[in-house]
Amino acid sequence: MDQHITDIKDPDIDYGSEPENIPLHQRPSISIRAKIAISFSLFFILSFTVTVWSYWILTKLEHKIEFLEIADNYMVEIQQARRFEKNYLLYRTDLDDALGHLKTADKILKNNSEKIEKILGPNHFNTMVSYMSKYHDQLILLGAAENDAAKEAIVPSLRQFGSQMVSFATEFVEKERISVTRMFLLAKRVPLYFMSAIFVLMVFVLVFLTRQLLLTLNRFMEYTKRIGEGDFSPITPARKYRDEFTKLAEAFNHMIKELDHKHNVLLESHKLRAIGTLVAGVAHELNNPLNNTLLTASMLTEDYEALSDEEKREMIDDVINETERAQRVVKNLLDFAREGETEMALLKIDKIVEDSTRLVVNQVRFAKVDLTLDCEPNLPLIAGDEQKLKQVFVNLILNAVDVLPPRGKIRINVKKDKVPGYVLITVEDNGPGIDEHIQGRIFEPFFTTKRRAKGTGLGLSVSRGIIKKLGGYIKLKSVPGKGTVFIVSLPATDSPSEIMSK
């Protein structure tokens, strides 16, 4: 036993090689760690993308704002040059002020050529420089003209190039302002988009963690509950892929296998206790036929010469009958004590219950308890193990006998259940009943209300395990002071194939 416990704790055991774990181990593997890493990688990638985009958009906005500042300074100088141009045409003032502002505008272009060219592009930048150069040339020609007629001839070209220069710069400045406004609007919206994406991703990760962790943990809680109720069927795959929980499921299957073995050991030990209880009654049951046999054989020996052949034959028949009676008692006890694996067969439940009552008839008689059995006719067959079912009903009857006073009553009823496809067996007594605060623990292993010398606390736990393994259930109804009823429901079957599927 110690070796088994050590094996369960050993992390080096290859549970996947065990037959019940092969279906779990054959699936492709995707670990929960990898899935969580992928989920957080998505968070990182999204955050990194938004950060890089924000850095890029802020850099671009910075360049555009610098361009707008340069363009504003450039426009101021151009407009001043046009103003002094108009003053010259109206009042013939000095053109040096116009040329001075134009020179400052040209200096602004040259000093910030890389930034402006990056925003406008080489072609548009060259066009802007060209317009300003032509306008400058026209101003020089205007100042060099010797008479008013010559000056008037230059004015249309001067105004054309000046207007083109201003309108070209104004158009691009306006476009950049609109672009900056749009980029600011987008920059304000992106955090909202980012938060929405984070929320969706969080919901996805939450659902993922719920499905991968919480639901799986709930499933394992159901497994533990099922094992606690005596169902030792192995865990089967629930998802397409293997993960860390697969190792846990394989360890569970190994534990279930060991628990099933230990459960069978406990079942056999409890059966031995029941056999010990039965032997006391069987000894009395055997005593009568053996005494009768001995008495008849002694009389036959002593009076053999004086007896007629007919009397001899009658005495021999008495010996045979009493011997057969003893043989039946021993056979019933041996059948009940027979060891072996679960052997499923089609059984008559009324016969199983009748045989169980015969096994305890002497205990019932010694306790001066009245036992009645009522079986409904034409009951369907059930699929089960005969000896284990007898053990269940013997245990229920003996439990009732232990708590009943003399002249107490036990009523056993076998009938079809109200639920189609089931057979119902009730074992009812009019004893003291069971207190409400301990009714929920009555099926727990090693829990007993009997004196330590009389009970181990395994009988009802083992019985529930047997009934549950056969697809049925066992329930308790008890009213303190009025008695107790144990209700056993077993699935009926008329097809041998149902037995093979168990």
Image (spheres, rainbow, N blue to C red):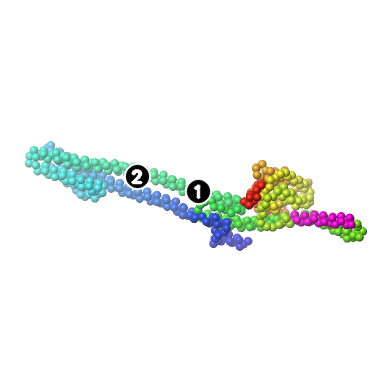
Left or right relative to 368: residue 73: left
Q: Nearer the viewer, residue 192 or 4?
A: 4
Quarter holding the N terminus? bottom right
Q: Which percent across, then down, holds residue 350?
A: 72, 47
Which structural element holds mark 2? helix
Q: Which residues are magenta?
A: 309-333
Question: At 14% from the left edge and 41% from the top edge, which residue is drawn?
Answer: 158
- Residue 428 in sight: no
Kindly indicate whether the residue at mark 1 contacts the one at mark 2 (C-beta within 8 angstroms).
Answer: no
Left or right relative to 342: residue 153: left
Query: Where is residue 337, by image quadrant?
Result: bottom right
Q: Nearer the viewer, mark 2 or mark 1?
A: 1
**Amino acid type shown at disc 1:** Thr
Q: Which percent across, then down, holds residue 344?
A: 66, 53
Q: Nearer the viewer, residue 379 or 472?
A: 379
Task: Name the outermost residue toward the right.
Answer: 306
Q: What residue is disc 2 on?
A: 187
Residue 94: in magenta span = no
Q: Which of marks 1 and 2 precedes in the sequence? A: 2
Question: At 85% from the left edge and 57% from the top edge, which residue is drawn?
Answer: 316
Q: Nearer the viewer, residue 241 or 108?
A: 241
Question: At 28% from the left edge and 46% from the top edge, which residue is drawn?
Answer: 64
Q: What residue is disc 1 on?
A: 210
Could you say which disc has been placed on residue 401 in the image? none
Left or right relative to 138: residue 7: right
Q: Which percent across, then down, holds residue 445?
A: 65, 53
